[in-house]
């Protein structure tokens, strides 16, 4: 029998390391240099945004610079500039100047950070970042966590841990429908990811008990205690988790964390704090005290890609007692033969969340924090909050403006209420909606639609390190200019 002939790849099909040789520095510099320039968002229809792209699947390649130019003409032209000083929409990360390098290093290293065995250095980097975050949150030394894709996934992972830990080994073996019906409690202002977590866990919407809010839009403590008492007296239901929010999406309100923790302790219920937005306050010595009580949580979500300024995507999930997560997520298989987490070298991130394959999300964060330091990052977070307080102070003394609530972090909601429309709430509603639309078209400021107590408001969320106090003055001036030219009959 003749020996088999080895296959040979022709030279023209070889992918060489030099294939990525393009001026990354020049490209990044060009993008970053425009990140704070007019307009906040470059609009266009889908046909315009995609006109430079190849409509057909490319059979033969083109020079790399050609492909780069196509992307710059599409994604690099029609986009929202999150770092723009007038970007007040949603809770958008501005990114940091170190991010392109951090993400380039991540891609170049191309590590699958399942744990120490597959990615030793990347695992050590991520565990260092997690130790920093545990310390800032005031959690015990043996707390742990990991970096996941976003707040929704972090919330799902934490709530699943809470549910299965509460229900015990029987639920792990036979499912959650064998015993009392699991219940998650959250205020009506909680992020919709909490309800989605209940749905994905098979609890249905009946698995969420909505807790009312008080006059300051915080979770009502008496209502929470009453619901927990009712559930504890009901053999058909089991309270598994209370979700408190540190920085609600609409108004940036912080639920009374310490008091909620005390109630949860009284009833033996897991406390999860969704600090996806407001967790950035931990970076500031001045703002940190507003999160008093977060150190008593059983799990915490903090998005680095929100007010912590880092580019997408990275969300911190912390566990006070990580062994409870390992009870749910820890698995052994013949293709995974490393030891469970007993030593640093045996650490496995997939013991703490559903993810197995995962990119090195911690590297850009470590690079940014190590370069800028807590002093600079925290002072910028603090300055955003100070600018919002300045805006609120101007609104309080303005006869044509009305605060929808006292701001706590870097979100301020208010309404334009001219004396000529006093008493006509529907026309005031329409005017505020039209102002948001006109601001977006103007290009200097971008706000997102929001309702407070069922009424449209002008919601200003500061997450950019480029925003200064004078932008608050300019915003109010533009709002008034727009209002003076609005025709509410059209």
Image (spheres, grey):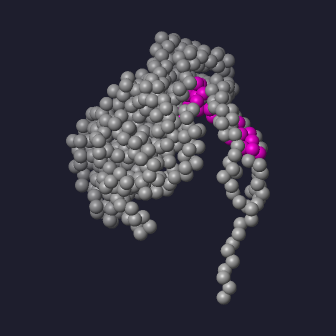
Counting from the top left corner in percent of width and height, residue 309 is at 51, 33
Which of these two is toward me, 407 or 180?
Answer: 407
Tag count in the figure?
Answer: 0
In the picture as drawn, the residue positioned furthest to the bottom comes out as 1
Q: Picture coordinates of residue 75 (x, y %)?
A: 68, 41
Q: Is residue 92 above or below residue 317?
A: above
Q: Quadrant of the C terminus?
A: top right
On the picture, is 468 further left or further right than 339?
Answer: right
Magenta segment's dominant SS is: loop
Q: Is residue 404 visible?
A: no
* Image quarter of residue 32: top right
| Residue 160 included in the magenta stretch of the image | no
Does the stretch in magenta take in 88?
A: yes
Look at the image and tell me whether residue 266 can be seen.
yes
Q: Left or right: where does residue 154 sit relative to residue 32? A: left
295 or 362, which lies in front? 362
Relative depth, front residue between 373 and 441? 373
Residue 382 on image: x %, y %: 44, 23
Magenta span? 65-94
Q: Nearer the viewer, residue 270 or 216?
A: 270
Please give left or right for residue 466 compared with residue 397 in the image.
Answer: right
* Residue plotted at (74% across, 39% down): 73
Q: Residue at x 34, y 59 (%)?
A: 340
Residue for point 69% across, 57% down? 15
- Rendered residue at 42%/64% (across/down): 336
* Displayed quadrant of residue 447: top right
């Amino acid at each position: 029998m003749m020996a088999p002939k080895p296959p040979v790849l022709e030279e023209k099909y070889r992918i060489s390391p030099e294939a990525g040789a393009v001026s990354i520095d020049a490209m990044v510099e060009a993008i970053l240099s425009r990140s704070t320039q007019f307009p906040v968002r470059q609009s266009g229809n889908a046909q315009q945004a995609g006109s430079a792209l190849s409509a057909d699947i490319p059979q033969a390649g083109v020079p790399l610079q050609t492909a780069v130019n196509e992307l710059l003409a599409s994604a690099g032209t029609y986009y929202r500039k999150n770092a723009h000083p007038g970007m007040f929409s949603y809770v958008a990360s501005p990114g940091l100047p170190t991010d392109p390098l951090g993400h380039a290093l991540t891609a170049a290293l191309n590590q699958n950070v399942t744990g120490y065995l597959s990615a030793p250095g990347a695992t050590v980097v991520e565990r260092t970042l997690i130790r920093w975050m545990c310390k800032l949150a005031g959690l015990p030394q043996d707390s742990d966590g990991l970096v996941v894709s976003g707040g929704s996934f972090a919330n799902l992972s934490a709530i699943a841990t809470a549910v299965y830990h509460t229900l015990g080994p029987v639920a792990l073996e036979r499912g959650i429908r064998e015993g009392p019906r699991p219940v998650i409690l959250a205020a009506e202002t909680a992020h919709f990811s909490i309800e989605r977590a209940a749905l994905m866990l098979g609890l249905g919407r009946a698995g969420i008990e909505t807790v009312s809010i008080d006059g300051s839009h915080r979770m009502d403590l008496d209502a929470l205690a009453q619901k927990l008492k009712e559930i504890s007296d009901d053999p058909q239901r089991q309270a598994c988790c209370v979700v408190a929010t540190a920085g609600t999406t609409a108004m940036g309100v912080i639920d009374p964390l310490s008091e909620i923790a005390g109630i949860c302790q009284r009833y033996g219920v897991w406390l999860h704090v969704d600090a996806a937005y407001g967790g950035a306050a931990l970076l500031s010595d001045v703002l940190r005290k507003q999160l008093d009580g977060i150190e008593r949580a059983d799990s915490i979500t903090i998005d680095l890609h929100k007010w912590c300024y880092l580019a997408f995507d990275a969300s911190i999930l912390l566990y006070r007692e990580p062994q409870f997560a390992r009870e749910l997520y820890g698995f052994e298989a013949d293709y995974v033969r490393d030891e469970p987490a007993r030593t640093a070298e045996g650490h496995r991130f997939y013991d703490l969340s559903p993810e197995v394959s995962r990119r090195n999300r911690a590297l850009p964060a470590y690079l940014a924090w190590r370069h800028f330091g807590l002093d600079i990052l925290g002072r910028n977070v603090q300055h955003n909050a100070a600018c919002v307080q300045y805006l609120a102070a101007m609104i309080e003394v303005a006869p044509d403006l009305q605060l929808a609530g006292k701001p706590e972090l870097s979100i301020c909601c208010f309404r334009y209420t001219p004396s000529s429309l006093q008493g006509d709430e529907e026309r005031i509603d329409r005017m505020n909606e039209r102002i948001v639309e006109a601001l977006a078209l103007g290009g200097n400021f971008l706000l997102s639609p929001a309702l407070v107590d069922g009424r449209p408001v002008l919601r200003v969320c500061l997450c950019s390190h480029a925003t200064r106090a004078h932008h608050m003055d300019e915003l109010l001036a533009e709002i008034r200019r727009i209002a003076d030219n609005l025709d509410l009959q059209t």
